[in-house]
Amino acid sequence: MIEFEMPKLPPTPDPEPCPTHGVVPELHSECQQCLQDLREATRQYNADRETWRRWEGATVPPRLQGKTLQTWKPRTPADRQAMALLQGYVADLQTNVKTGRGVLLMGGPGLGKSHLLAALIGDAVEAGLEAGFIAWPELITRHREAQQGDRTHRDRTLLQTAMDMGVLALDEIGLAPMTEWQLAELFRLVDSRYSRLQPTLLAGNVNPATLGKAIGERTADRLLESCVCVPLTGASRRPDAPQRPEPPRFSEPQPVTMNVWLGHRWSERKIEAERFSHGRREL
């Protein structure tokens, strides 16, 4: 009988310290601090991705997607007072949202009302809130066309979506004289949100004296009670505006990889995105 001697395997070398953390992992194990870094990077990646998804769903117009409060430069004492009001609103954003406190930006064309409205929506998105931006003329036109169409029209529930939005920015109120039906639909929207303590951010070429005539006294009365009123004055800023819009405030984060130390070599790990629900409301 011939006996075969099994070849002896070389002894497993002892693990070496992680080049990044200086910690020696257990035999056949990963560096625990590398794994902790991987978990934190994954958490941050998914948080950034969810912020970007909320921003995409907010439907801020491309020209306004790079606007922030910091890029709106006060030019007069009245501007500085307006900025102080808005900064105070953002500083206590969660409380304002919980109590249904909104913002009403009033003034002539070209003063940066849409800029500030988009900036506030960006702050809401950054704070983890569901938000949406739409101009009133667009909303009422799409709503009217949907009501005149069949029950499968994609905007059939547009007004209800605006009513239910966590934070709603409504631009260009009072842009043109409204019909009785339009006034009634605007009142329905504002009253629904007012009654349920949902904050509405609005901007329009109006002032406190003309607001009621432009949008209806009952609607104006609710807004003046529930909003921080921010009057803007002066000449149009558009002649001094940059020729190119700023880059978007938020962008889609790109997948990355990280290395985990295995004792003798690195193992590349790809950060995976979590799956998110697609049930988010969008205007």
Image (cartoon, rainbow, N blue to C red):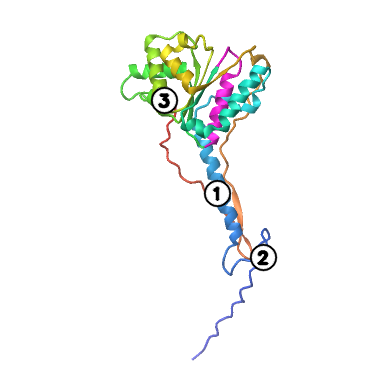
Q: What secondary structure is marked by label 2?
A: loop
Question: Residue at 65% of width from left, 21% of height from top?
Answer: 80
Q: Residue 273, image x and y in percent?
A: 51, 46
Work out how far the residue at label 2 is from the one at label 3, CA to CA, in angstroms: 59 Å
Relative to residue 8, is residue 177 depicted above or below? above
N-terminal-most mark, 1 or 3: 1
Q: Residue 4, image x and y in percent?
A: 53, 85
Question: What label sits on residue 193 in the rendered view?
Answer: 3
Work out how far the residue at label 1 is from the one at label 3, CA to CA, in angstroms: 37 Å
Tell me if residue 267 can be seen.
Answer: no
N-terminal-most mark, 2 or 1: 2
Residue 126: say if magenta: yes
Residue with the most extreme front position: 225
Relative to residue 282, is residue 106 depicted above or below? above
Q: Amino acid at mark 2?
A: Pro
Q: Amino acid at mark 3?
A: Arg
Q: Quadrant of residue 111?
A: top right
Q: Count the labels in the image.
A: 3
N-terminal-most mark, 2 or 3: 2
Relative to residue 8, is residue 82 depicted above or below? above
Which residue range is magenta in the image? 106-127
In what quadrant of the picture does the C terminus appear? top left
Q: Is residue 5 left or right of residue 195?
A: right
Question: Residue at 52% of width from left, 49% of height from top?
Answer: 272
Q: Nearer the viewer, residue 257 or 213?
A: 213
Q: Is residue 164 left or right of residue 83?
A: left
Work out how far the residue at label 2 is from the one at label 1, CA to CA, in angstroms: 24 Å
- Residue wearing tag 2: 17
Q: What secondary structure is marked by label 3?
A: helix
- Residue wearing tag 1: 42
